[in-house]
């Protein structure tokens, strides 16, 4: 079979759908091929935050931020580790791309308000104004196609399929503490009950699921075709550039000729052993939060066609610590420890020597970098989060809910380790009991003074933002003293990759000699990260993914940004 279109987009994640949507809005004949049977990729299971300095939504809400300040921040964080033209394009186009989507599609964003950059002590860092998130979306608008939205991580849903946002958690936990909480919770549960009469899960979706739902709904409204179960297997062209691609669908080959280009947005190489071995730290992390179909298809095809891979500085990954969750069906899930527990008072992380090795309240990316660094001298993979019963009751731990409502069930599945004394806990996790006692005692001393002499926990805006403001004198440090005691093993896992195909500012793929490969674009995790392996703030992956997808489509239709 043969087809001819203006623009072929490989991958229906956030980047791919954005490129397809913008191309369609600008009058191009667009075809999307998606390897799986669902849209969304890794974006669907993410928090859905976009890091867009100077965005209109935050400025309208009164949060003053400028791209100039963000540029100074990136200078301090990254230095010359990234192409200046690429960074300038991201900063200048970010607000434009977001406003374009809001004006011409079903995609809508809200400002996150206070949401500190992850290195808030650096020049140009912001406490608020740079993070935006897609507004919640009603999945019922998709009808039967709601099943095409990749669901969130099961551990991030309650009652078997209901999504909850950060604002939903307090009223749900305290549903019997006030009339307002009860009414709020009752409305959520009523909606969810009626949803389950028709759908496999709740249709009130938010975070990354909402972004994906809004993009997909916009494509459906414009009747942009998506071929599901279609894998891009080869690029067509010659030394003058890419002229199409070969797609495998239901055992058949489809040759797609393109008048404007091919956009590679297949999600990066997260599940490709060759690339993981080549670019990731040793020992190569065993776990990934990336969508299971992200096997490096786009990166491999680009490399085969002569494109240059750009290894990012650092560890070629964007990381989070994860715990392994035994599920009722016998499978194992991964719970990302992003913001809900590590910064709260009354928790420490220790390595195999029973010593702290990190400011537990730092960003999830920096926490894992500390694991890698420590592991070179003392084993820190896995590391253990240590807390007590009071902490579980107040904050929960990983997949354990605040209050411990599911604690017994998860303990029975050996999700976490419990002991009546620290000495017994040390024995169960095979660390030195005396050293663990000394480590906890030293930390408890910091809880009294509010000053973490060793790692400075609670001293930055990011630490305090994710801590407990009601806890004094330091919102991130509290005693570990109420038995029983708990330990939870955490491992490094990538949530995105930063090594990919080198591109110019319009997402055009570059050959090994630095020349542009005409007709070939890359965005999302197929594109080498503009952040050069650094993690400046919330939405480091999705922000550039949307921006460079927009720039790729605009260039393809002859409306390249300045």
Image (tube, rainbow, N blue to C red):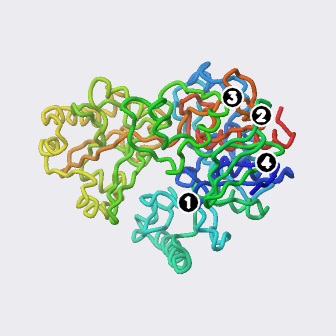
Nearest to the eye among marks 3 and 1: give it: 1
Q: Is residue 356 left or right of residue 23?
A: left
Up/down of 376 relative to 551, above or below: above
Q: How far apart are marks 2 and 3 (CA)?
A: 25 Å
Check disc 3 and report its element: helix, strand or loop: helix
Q: Where is residue 229 in the image (x, y as percent from the top left)?
A: 61, 59
Q: Which numbered disc flags the more N-terminal residue, 4 or 3?
A: 3
Mark closer to the observer (1, 4): 4
The quadrant of the image that shows the C terminus is top right
Please tell me how crowded label 3 is: few (under 14), some (14-19), or many (20+) other residues with Cα within 10 Å.
some
Q: Identify the residue under disc 1.
A: 150
- Say which residue label 3 marks: 87
Residue 257: give its label: 4
The first of marks 3 and 1 along the sequence is 3
Instruction: Work out how far the residue at label 2 is from the one at label 1, CA to CA, in angstroms.
Output: 34 Å
Decide which of 138, 63 is in the foreground and name it: 138
Disc 3, disc 1: CB below 8 Å? Answer: no
What residue is drawn where x is 58% and y is 45%? 267
Is 201 placed left or right of 239 in the picture?
Answer: left
Quadrant in which residue 304 is drawn = top right
Residue 165 in the image: state x and y as whole percent.
Answer: 52, 58
Q: Determine crowd level at label 2: few under 14, some 14-19, many 20+ residues with C-alpha closer than 10 A.
A: some
Left or right: 306 with respect to 388? right
Q: Which of marks 4 and 3 is in front?
A: 4
Q: Name the residue under label 2.
A: 241
Q: Do the residues labelled 1 and 4 touch (CB within 8 Å)?
A: no
Which mark is in front, 2 or 1? 2
Q: Which of marks 2 and 3 is in front?
A: 2
Q: Does any portion of residue 198 appear in the rendered image?
A: yes
Q: What element carries label 2?
A: strand
Q: Residue 526 at what x, y percent from top left?
A: 61, 39
Contact between marks 4 and 3 (CB within 8 A): the answer is no
């Amino acid at each position: 079979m043969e087809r001819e279109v203006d623009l072929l987009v490989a991958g229906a994640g956030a980047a791919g759908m954005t490129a397809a949507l913008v191309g369609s809005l600008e009058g191009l004949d667009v075809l999307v091929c998606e390897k799986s049977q669902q849209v969304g990729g890794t974006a669907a299971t993410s928090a859905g935050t976009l890091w867009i300095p100077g965005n209109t939504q935050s400025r309208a809400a009164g949060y003053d931020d400028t791209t100039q300040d963000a540029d100074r921040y990136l200078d301090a964080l990254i230095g010359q580790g990234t192409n200046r033209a690429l960074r300038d394009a991201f900063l200048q186009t970010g607000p434009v791309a977001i406003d374009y989507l809001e004006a011409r599609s079903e995609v809508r964003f809200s400002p996150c308000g206070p949401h500190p950059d992850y290195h808030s002590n650096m020049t140009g860092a912001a406490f608020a104004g740079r993070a935006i998130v897609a507004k919640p979306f009603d999945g019922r608008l998709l009808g039967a196609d709601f099943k095409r939205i990749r669901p969130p991580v099961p551990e991030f849903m309650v009652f078997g399929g209901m999504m909850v946002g950060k604002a939903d958690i307090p009223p749900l936990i305290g549903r019997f503490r006030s009339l307002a909480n009860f009414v709020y919770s009752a409305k959520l549960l009523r909606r969810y009950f009626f949803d389950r009469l028709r759908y496999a899960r709740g249709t009130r979706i938010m975070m990354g699921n909402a972004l994906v739902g809004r993009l997909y709904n916009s494509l459906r409204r414009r009747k942009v075709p998506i071929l599901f179960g279609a894998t891009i297997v080869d690029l067509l062209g010659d030394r003058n550039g890419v002229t199409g691609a070969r797609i495998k669908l239901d055992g058949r080959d489809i040759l797609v000729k393109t008048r404007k280009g091919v956009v590679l947005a297949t999600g990066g190489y997260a599940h490709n052993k060759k690339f993981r071995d080549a670019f990731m730290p040793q020992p190569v992390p065993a776990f990934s939060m990336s969508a299971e179909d992200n096997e490096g298809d786009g990166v491999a095809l680009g490399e085969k066609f002569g494109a240059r891979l750009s290894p990012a500085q650092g560890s070629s990954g964007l990381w989070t610590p994860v715990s392994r969750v035994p599920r009722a069906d016998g499978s194992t899930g991964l719970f990302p420890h992003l913001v809900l527990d590590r910064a709260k008072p009354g928790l420490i992380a220790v390595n195999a020597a029973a010593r702290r090795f990190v400011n537990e309240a730092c960003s999830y990316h920096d926490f894992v970098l500390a694991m890698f660094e420590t592991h070179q001298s003392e084993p820190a993979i896995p590391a253990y989060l240590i807390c007590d019963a009071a902490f579980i009751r107040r904050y929960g731990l990983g997949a354990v809910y605040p209050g411990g409502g599911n604690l017994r069930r998860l303990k029975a599945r050996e999700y976490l380790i419990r002991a009546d004394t620290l000495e017994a806990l040390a024995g169960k996790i095979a660390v030195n009991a005396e050293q663990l006692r000394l480590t906890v005692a030293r930390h408890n001393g910091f809880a009294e003074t509010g000053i973490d002499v060793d790692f400075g926990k609670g001293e930055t805006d990011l630490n305090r933002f994710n801590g407990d403001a009601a806890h004094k004198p330091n919102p991130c440090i509290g005693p570990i003293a109420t038995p029983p005691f708990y330990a939870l093993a955490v491992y490094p896992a990538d949530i995105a990759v930063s090594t990919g195909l080198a591109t110019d500012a319009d997402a055009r793929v570059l050959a090994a000699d630095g020349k542009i490969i005409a007709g070939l674009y890359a965005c999302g995790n197929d594109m080498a990260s503009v952040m050069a392996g650094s993690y400046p703030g919330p939405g480091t992956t999705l922000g550039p993914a949307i921006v460079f997808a927009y720039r790729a489509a605009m260039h393809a239709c002859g409306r390249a940004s300045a």
